[in-house]
Image (cartoon, rainbow, N blue to C red):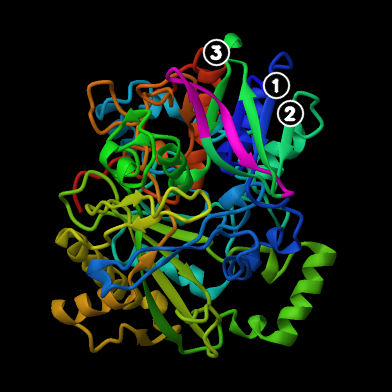
Amino acid sequence: MQFDYIIVGAGSAGCVLANRLSTDNTKSVLLLEAGPENTALSLKIPAAVLSNLNSTKHNWAYQGEPEPQLGARRLKHDRGKTLGGSSSINGMVFIRGHALDFEGWRQAGCDGWSYADVLPYFKRMETYAGGEDDYRGGDGPMRVHRPAPEDPITLAFLAAGEQAGHPVTDDICGYQQEGFGLLDSSVHKGVRWSCATAYLDPARERSNLTIKTNTHVQQVVFAHGNATGVVYIDENGLRQNAEVDRNAGGEVILSAGAVASPQLLMLSGIGPAEHLREMNIEVIKDVPGVGQNLNDHPDFVLKFKCKEPVSIWPKTRLFARTLEGIRWLIKKDGVCASNHFDTVACLRSGPEFEHPDIQLTISPVAVDDQTWQPLPMHAFQIHVGLMQAYSRGQITLRSNDPSEAPRILVNYLQDPRDLELLRRGVHIVRELVAQAAFADICGDEIYPGSDKTSNEELDRCLVEKTCSQWHLSGTARMGSATDKGAVVDPAGRVYGVNGLRVVDASIMPVVTNGNTNSPTIMIAEKLSDAILGMAPLPRIDAKVWQQQSH
């Protein structure tokens, strides 16, 4: 059977595309997802994040390569494997990034991707609980929750930021990202609001949309430089073919994410020619940038004891957790109805940055790094995320076997500037918890420990504990036709072949300043118009706050 569009991957981007492309009832759409349906209860409960990440049923849980600058540690890279993809298992943090991120994309040769170009799509995607305005949407598929924090730890975080002299913002996704403010989440009425819920569920009954789960795509098929379809293994383990109608302009669209999309390109003969030949893969097109430019946000966590019993740790113990689970089933509220990241600080680590490069988030419970279980004490932790890391990694094939996961080498802290910036983040956190707002709450520093003060001591701790925020991106980046490292053009079309696009976080030229789910949805919203041949939404020239110096 032939289709107008074959979408590989039903993650955040794939769900958006399946919905938007199937609104044209003259077009047939096939959506292929390697994972199962998203019916598991744990995928609906916001507080069940850790249980989803500790399981491999809905998580690819890729094992990274030994990281040279992290003592050869291998980090686990969580990626969603179900309808909704990572939006079904992630931390539900909803942040767009800074306006200057997109200005940077435009300046890197991605015409049509400035902030004024993308803001209309950020608005189109959402219904914001805080209300529609010049920056926020009021009738989109994504339900975005604005929290109203009440716990003492979170409130102390906000107050301490102001006491330390940092800016305060009313909306990190609006006029002013920089500063301390509330952190939105993809939660609605106490339930995770994944892209499968937002985009796929309303489109499921359309006769021109076919959804196949437990279906693992092996490669894209080409004829004379044209993508003609895909080969996949179906739920019964049988090898199948799906074709696009090239006479009607049919396309294959890879939305498998920053790991699997470049993997599929290379398995299909699109990538660095020398590497493909090493893997005994016929070279369809030498595209050196495939799998390169791997971006991520390194994460380092400081943990603190509480002086008073103000954390949510008691509610994570078995009996209390069971009661909270029952409460959620009945009322969809309580501890289980939140991701417990209600506030954020987007800060510049130094005056040399035009916009924030450090993101702080606080959790009213501290978690053991090995077991991912709450520490058995009243404690909290603050994450230091490096938003503009200088280090770059790569995705390469392990073999030409599609069932074998690729090699993921992020090269965390390879550039020594990243160490310096994370160190600055640690000092910012320590200054924060020393403010009056934390005087009755913050006790001893559990990790790294207040005795770790020198650069050498902190660097050892950073090497020992830096991990991933799971924001892999940039491995099939957009760029102009003269950019030798670019994989796709600003419409997501793969250079050198016809009928093939990539639409997901892998096409980001540089990772955005914040969690990547929201901008990934925006990318798919914007490119769905391009695929359908529709004019882009009118630009919105909205003002953006910038602080000139600290």
Q: Position of residue 4 (x, y in %)?
A: 64, 19
The C terminus sits in image quarter: bottom left
Tell me the residue that label 1 is attached to: 28
Point out the tag, 3 or 1, that comes first from the N-terminus.
1
Tell me the residue that label 2 is attached to: 209
Q: Main secondary structure of the magenta part?
A: strand
Picture mark count:
3
Q: Residue at x 22, y 66 (%)?
A: 424
Point out the tag, 2 or 1, that comes first from the N-terminus.
1
Amino acid under label 3? Answer: Met
Badge nearest the viewer, 3 or 1: 1
Name the element at disc 1: loop
Q: Is residue 22 above or below residue 277?
A: above
Residue lying farthest to the front in this orientation: 280
Res. 383 mark: none
Q: Residue at x 52, y 37 (%)?
A: 219
Amino acid under label 1? Answer: Ser
Front position in the image: 29 or 206: 29
Q: Residues within 10 Å of mark 3 (few under 14, many from 20)?
A: few
Q: Position of residue 528 (x, y in %)?
A: 55, 24
Tell me the residue that label 3 is attached to: 534
Chain part drawn in magenta:
220-236
Does any portion of residue 416 appear in the rendered image?
A: yes
Q: How far apart are labels 3 and 1 at the CA level? A: 17 Å
The N terminus sits in image quarter: top right
Q: Is residue 72 above or below residue 254?
A: below
Q: Position of residue 83 (x, y in %)?
A: 67, 47
Q: Are marks 2 and 1 in contact (CB under 8 Å)?
A: yes
Q: Are marks 3 and 2 in contact (CB under 8 Å)?
A: no
Front position in the image: 502 or 505: 502
Front position in the image: 133 or 388: 388
